[in-house]
Amino acid sequence: MSIMGTRVLRKEDPKFLTEGATYTADISHPKLKGAVHAHFVRSTMAHAKILEIDTSEAASQPGVLAVYTAQDIPESVAPAPVMVPVFPPSMMHRPHLATGSVRFVGEPVAVVVAETPAQAADAADLVFADYEPLPAAVGLAQAETDNTVIYEDVGSNTAVDFKNMNMVTGIGEEDIFADCEVVVEHDLINHRTAPAPLEGRSMACVWDDGRLIVWASTQTPHGFRDNLAAVYGLEAENCQVIAPDVGGGFGQKIGITADEIVLPWLSQSLNRPIRWTETRTENLTACGHGRAQLQKVKIGGSQGGQIKAYRLQITGDAGAYTGLGAFLPFYTHLMAPGVYNFPKVETTAKSVVSNTTPTLAYRGAGRPEATAAIERAVDLFAAECGLSPVEVRRMNLISKDSFPYTTPHGTEYDTGDYETALNLALEAADYPALLEEQARRRAQGSVKQLGIGVSVYVEITGGPAPGGQEFAKVEITPEGKAKVYSGSFSHGQGHATTFVSVAADQLGMDIDDIEFIQGDTDLVAEGTGTFGSRSFQFAGSAVYDASRSVVDVAREIAAGLLEANVDDVLVDAEADGFHVAGTPAVAVSWAQVAGAAQEQGKKLMHEGQHHANCTYPFGAHVIVVEVDTETGQVTVPQVVTCDDSGTIFNPNIVEGQRHGGIAQGIAQALTEEVVFDEDGNPITSNFADYGFISAAELPSFKLVPLETPTPHNPLGAKGIGESGAIGATPATQSAVVNALSHLGVRHIDIPLTPERVWQAIVDATAQN
Amino acid sequence: MEIAVKINGEQHRHDVEPRTLLVHYIRDTVGLTGTNIGCDTSSCGACTIHLNGESVKSCTMFAVQADGEELLTIEGLAASVNATDGQMHPMQEAFRSCHALQCGYCTPGMVMASVSLLEENPNPNEQEVRQGLEGNLCRCTGYHNIVKAVLECAQGGAK
Amino acid sequence: MIPAAFDYVRADSAEAAIAALAEHGDEAKLLAGGHSLIPLMRFRLARPEVLVDVGRVDDLKYIRDGGDHLAIGALTRHMDVETSELVQAEAPLLAAATSHVGDPQVRHRGTIGGSVAHGDSASDIPSVLIATGATLVAQGPSGVREIAVDDFFEGFLETALAAEEILTEIRVPKVGGAGWSFQKFNRRAQDWAIVGVSVQVLNGSVGIGLVNMDTKPIRASAAEAALVGGSSAADAAEVAPDSCEPTGDLNASPDFRRHLAKVLTRRALEEAGVS
């Protein structure tokens, strides 16, 4: 019997619960004995010329081995490879330590190495950097003007305009809104947020006879290895990266960061193993942020609610150096039309550098921004037409029988049933009763008004198109047990349970007889990692492929032992091995087959990459809010979501992903925003100031199941890691606006802080 | 300065710098790394342990303040209720059965805070659990299954 | 983050603590529960050279019936105040407000005296002391003195305590049966108040303390006066922020703070039974 669809409890949990997982800072490997500690000295200026960095006093402190600045790092420590090489060279080739000038607060300018973390911290206080302040370009609106150009050699802050690369449609000659009766335009903000995994970056490394051994908190161990190998001129086999347990990533730990790249050189030059664990402030100011887009939407259609044309213009904030974040406006473009069958869609997209922390691929990475824009635009259009936002959505959704559906951009959605998702979510929320309660409160003029927000989304997982790949290896031990190796890497997603379950299903073995190996580049030959909701569809499929290949070989061997025709032999978990169909009493075990394989010189092992297309999960969120009209306070009494990620293997894991995403989506709408002052100083640099959402601000979530399998992989699975974060933000925003719509409020920017909500009420009341 | 601290029933004696935070002492000196550090502002609760039976944030105490006291960390929780070998504390069991953890980083602190919460309020409603865990942040679970686990543990009559 | 190094002095009595403060002067800081001080030290925003730990001065940990008032030792933990039946019965506003301080872990360590002596305008407890008309007891080298709450908070993180003085006791009038309300407005449960209001009504006399409405904990004097003059709760609330100079920050502009003070004061008055 298959365990697919059952709630298998996680194999990793007993250790996590009784002694705690083993994170990078917890590693006590003999090779790390006597490790020294690094402490970065960071820029306190958003933009300045570095005149001098005086390290002399710091260097003479007790326990200090060295204090280095950029000029100490030899050229042999090469620049890091660039992930997306579409930006001007000076913007994308970030120096390992700030060189010549600093471009954001938090950029490392020096690094202290000492015997203890306390000594390193004490000495870091005594590194004196002398700066000549330069005007700072902070915030997109300012950076876009080019009044302050950060890279003189480029001459503009625009890092990329995707129109020039023919990657977006641009605005054509023809006026796509010409035949629209109703046209609405609005500027939207999709503000900067922090991924904020509970564990920040952490790394330890040592050189061992010319080999570099690294422990790191990363989502992509092989990518981390490849980066270090390139920087240090090593063959891949001479660089081992071990990712132990990792305390969350949310996109922040894809690839490698400048700070991490420097550590092996420190270890090399001092001939000591070294450790570094960032503080929360470093994580919140120096590691990387998400979102950060300004958008202009224009939407038009008939008075009756039929939408005919949509235009989305995107400007993304790359921060001070162009990383993955600078590329994400392209993703927003890709998913711009969302779940709707608009005949005409136009997009522009560009990224701009600014004197702020670089941006990266935070949970959803470009797709939440697309959904937020289109969902807000549809709400604005519905309001202008005086129609129900739900009805306008129903009228314009891509119908169930249109799949595969190609958008006006050329993106091909695999499968979907958007209207069912919307209907199921509304039904579970008891939408009619909510409308009634809303009407009652409006009639009574209640202080606490009820708002019902709806969003329908589709996103792309395993991207970018056309798809991706992941590695797996499955081998049978001489004892007849199995080992599953995955090139993907769990940092909370439960691969050790889910992937083993996939193998167990195919191998007909108990999950406890299967060992799972991940996160060590010496043990796992190849790998890509976990991000972009890709793991189960690619890596799970790779495990599936490899398991089946092993079973094929094993069946041949078993057929020999059973003296049967191979086509009649099957593997059967109940019978604990192989038998001829219909006669389970006569079976050979995996151990027998393994023994025979050894005798016959056959290998019960398969390894390889599984390649597959991207998939397009979708869903609908209904979020109910109460808005205190006197204070602007928003509370969330009810959340209902229907998130379809194709075939579900382990409902616990899938629901857990949805829960976390929903919370982060609501958090972006209500409490979380990375803020800089006008000089570029971060003012949300710790958890007392950054509004990381807690249990007390959230309700329990009602999850409605829906499974529309994809044909793109053998498991029928789509990604689920980011869906919650994509649907929840616009639904929450929509709910707050909806609560106040009777007062004349049409739009409030996120995050919906009490003051902003209160101000919207005041403004609307004054206008009426 | 020399301190004597009982951790998970075992007596420890060490000479520590006064500025050593209790969490650093537990992790680096004693070597119990189950307790994690997630922030600098007493906000996240990843470092939550029990001091004389009550939840505290071990990042907001100096080790010298714990001199002579009794501490309990995640590593000692199961044994503290005399769970037999391989068994867990009912709260740990509830977290497992409810899938109340993903990356695991907040988990030790969350479990210790939850146990303390039920000590003080053995039969909380959902809102009381949510308020009671206001000082423990989790990025993975959206708190849904954590709240469920604490409520299930309470209903199971366990502490 | 790791605090800067300091010398550690453990005081076993109030007198010993006072002597240590006298000896080290400006370089010394008192350490009680540590929940105001240690985060500052971790950021090295506070770098005391000497910490005088009064955490073991057990004779400053008590809640006593003092006849017409409750006498609460300065080192009594928030959790003990919050759960004290005596406090719940005789100073219900204090018990309720204390349950909003920080989070449970903070309340297991933080002390009422530490919180009050820190003098933070955003802290919940000072507003209660203002609303209830509490008295603070300080002890110094030259003896013990009582300080009326209105004389205690002097400015930004500044109190009437002299450098060599320590806060030993908080006296809160016993008011079983009084009307009261504590209104705390914040974005996340564990956060400091953006604005908070404490109201206590006893025999027609109304005390109103405000949280985070000025550089120091402050009394809503204009609103209290309006009520004395016969104004309605709603009208009195409108003048609650008069004479306050709130600052603007990440969470609220000064104008929004003023607005919140009015709304919350009105709600507090209504909940406390003032119409």
Image (tube, coloured by chain):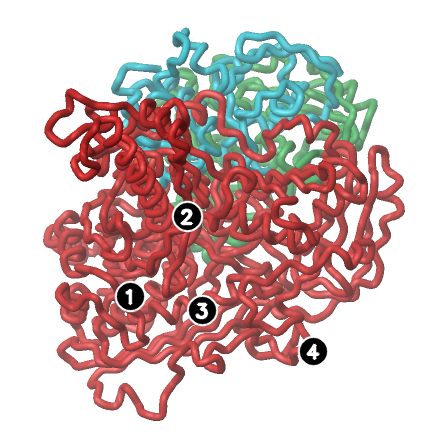
C-alpha gap between disc 4 and disc 2: 45 Å
Q: Which of pointers 2 and 1 indicates the residue nearer the eye?
A: 2
Same subunit, tags 3 and 1: yes
> How many numbered marks does the figure carry?
4
Q: Which residue position holds label 1? A: A375
Q: Is residue A678 left or right of residue C24?
A: left
Q: Which of pointers 2 and 3 indicates the residue nearer the eye?
A: 2
C-alpha gap between disc 2 and disc 1: 41 Å
| Colour of chain C in the image | green
Mark 3 element type:
helix
Residue in the picture at 49% in, 26% down: A20
- The chain drawn in cyan is B
The tag earlier along the polypeptide, 1 or 4, is 4
Q: Position of residue B131 (x, y in %)?
A: 37, 33
**Chain for disc number 4:** A
The tag earlier along the polypeptide, 3 or 4, is 4
Q: Is residue A199 left or right of residue A758?
A: right
Q: Which of pointers 1 and 4 indicates the residue nearer the eye?
A: 4
Relative to A83, residue A224 above or below: above
